[in-house]
Amino acid sequence: MRLYNTLSRQKEDFQPIDASHVRMYVCGPTVYDFAHIGNARPIIVFDVLNRLLRHLYGQSAVTYVRNITDVDDKINARAAERGISIRELTEETARIFHEDVAALGCLKPDVEPRATEHIVEMIAIIEKLIAAGHAYAAEGHVLFSVPSMGDYGQLSRRPLDEMIAGARVDVAAYKRDEMDFVLWKPSKESEPGWDSPWGRGRPGWHIECSAMSWKHLGETFDIHGGGIDLVFPHHENEIAQSRCAFGAKVMANVWMHNGFLQVEGEKMSKSLGNFITIRQLLATEDFGDQKWAGDVLRLAMLRTHYRQPIDWTARGLDEAQKTLENWADLVARHKIASATPTPHASVVEALLDDLNTAAAFAALAELAKASRHDYSAAQNLANTALWLGFDTSAWFARAGDAAGDNLDPAFKAQVESLVAARLEARAQKNFAESDRLRDELAAMGVQLKDGKGANGEAVTTWEVKR
Ligand code: AMP
Ligand code: ZN
């Protein structure tokens, strides 16, 4: 497998540190509000990578960790605004997030650590950093000393002045250098806080991920992922903390970042009023006057390669829906009623090239084309779609309908006798009668397909059109 590594700015052969235990960390949501469709992108993209890693290295050979950030100033502010407790807000938001991403066909990560449950590890890392001269305490704060790290900035490779401008958001007298960033800060009585060697306080955002990945994956692991906006400062600072605390050359070997999603050609933002949540798309009629199945959103997301920007449009969703309809039809036509989650080789091959889902769907389109006349291609299509996280159960139910399995037996017997009578009429070249029978069946909602059997004999299949 080849993966584009943001650290080296090139595609590299993927070599796990330990092929019997592949380890991946992805930055998860800060739980204060509904996740928007942009937030869904890293969840869906890294879900596909998780599935691919398991296919390559074994179901139980992968540990996928995706955290929940449940301590953050945005959370405090929102809880106060709504007049509920922080706990209520984070629990409610996490529950909604879980429902949303399940509807999008994403598997659960193996571990879903919460920041508030890893304060001990955060304090331990901060103490290591202070002891090694990479951090200092000042006025109840602890700051990471950026100049103490000779090769700070390798991930984002930003020019120094840009990094300073980025860090300047919180200028403070207690900072020794403009670029130093917060590891720990004091909490007021009304704010959540934990006892620490520096007084009652709470962690900075970056230290949370260093602590959770350390606890669950170790000092150095294989893959770290997230959206492109996290490269600086979040991931740059995670790297600084973890490498300096553990004296490690790298924190993670491969750094992967998905591109951004925009809506109908515009940046998605609350102020533009084009901010759209997963829930709205799933449950209401807010986008293109239509409610969308989770599968449609998943396909629309994955049709673009993960590093490219996506323009999220109602038209794109329409197209994804038509594609899924077509697959369901093909599978039903062959009366395929079950599948095993295994990917077709052509799809695996596409994904091995830096998770090229766009090429994977082109390969699926080829399978779909072959499925028109080929039962085994249709079975492969179903198997691969199921493996990719699409909900094929409705397809199989439709296959059951097409086969008449779910119909009233008396109705089915009547249809079958009419179909047989029509075949008989055709064999006798009594086309007036065969057309009349076709119309009679159509009036019953039954659609016929005439074809040939294995020995060239006339065969008619039928299905009930809803
Ligand atoms: P946040 O809650 O802002 O920390 O974002 C959670 C995840 O969603 C991060 O991995 C972000 O990079 C990602 N993300 C946020 N907005 C977008 C967007 N418009 N397109 C793609 N990814 C996004
Ligand atoms: Zn993170």
Image (spheres, helix red, strand yellow):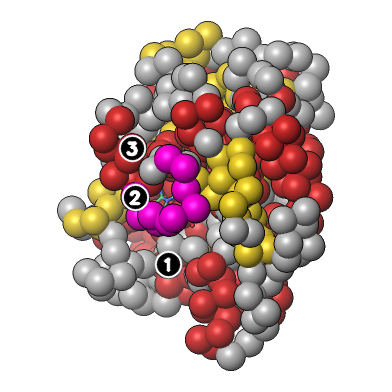
Magenta-tinted stretch: 168-177
Label 3 SS: helix
Q: Earlier in the sequence, mark 1 or mark 3?
A: 3
Q: Residues within 10 Å of mark 1 (few under 14, many from 20)?
A: some
- Quickly name the residue at label 2: 168
Q: Residues within 10 Å of mark 2 (few under 14, many from 20)?
A: some
Going 43% across and 40% down the picture, which residue do you hit?
Answer: 177
Q: CA distance from mark 3 to mark 2?
A: 8 Å
The residue mark sitting in front, 1 or 3, is: 3
Examine the rendered structure and indicate whether residue 133 appears above or below residue 47.
Answer: above
Going 49% across and 53% down the picture, which residue do you hit?
Answer: 174
Examine the rendered structure and indicate whether residue 314 appears above or below residue 1.
Answer: below
Q: Which mark is residue 277?
A: 1
Image coords of residue 460 (percent x, y) = 49, 45
Quarter containing the N terminus = top right
Q: Earlier in the sequence, mark 1 or mark 2?
A: 2
Taking depth in this image into account, of 405 and 417 the one nearest to the observer is: 405
Q: Residues within 10 Å of mark 3 (few under 14, many from 20)?
A: some
Q: Quadrant of residue 49?
A: top right
Taking depth in this image into account, of 314 and 229 the one nearest to the observer is: 229
Q: Quadrant of residue 436?
A: bottom left
* For residue 314, side relative to residue 1 (left or right): left
Image coords of residue 466 (percent x, y) = 47, 68
Is the residue under label 2 in contact with that under label 3 (CB below 8 Å)?
Answer: no
Q: Which mark is residue 163?
A: 3
User: Which residue type does callout 2 highlight?
Assistant: Arg
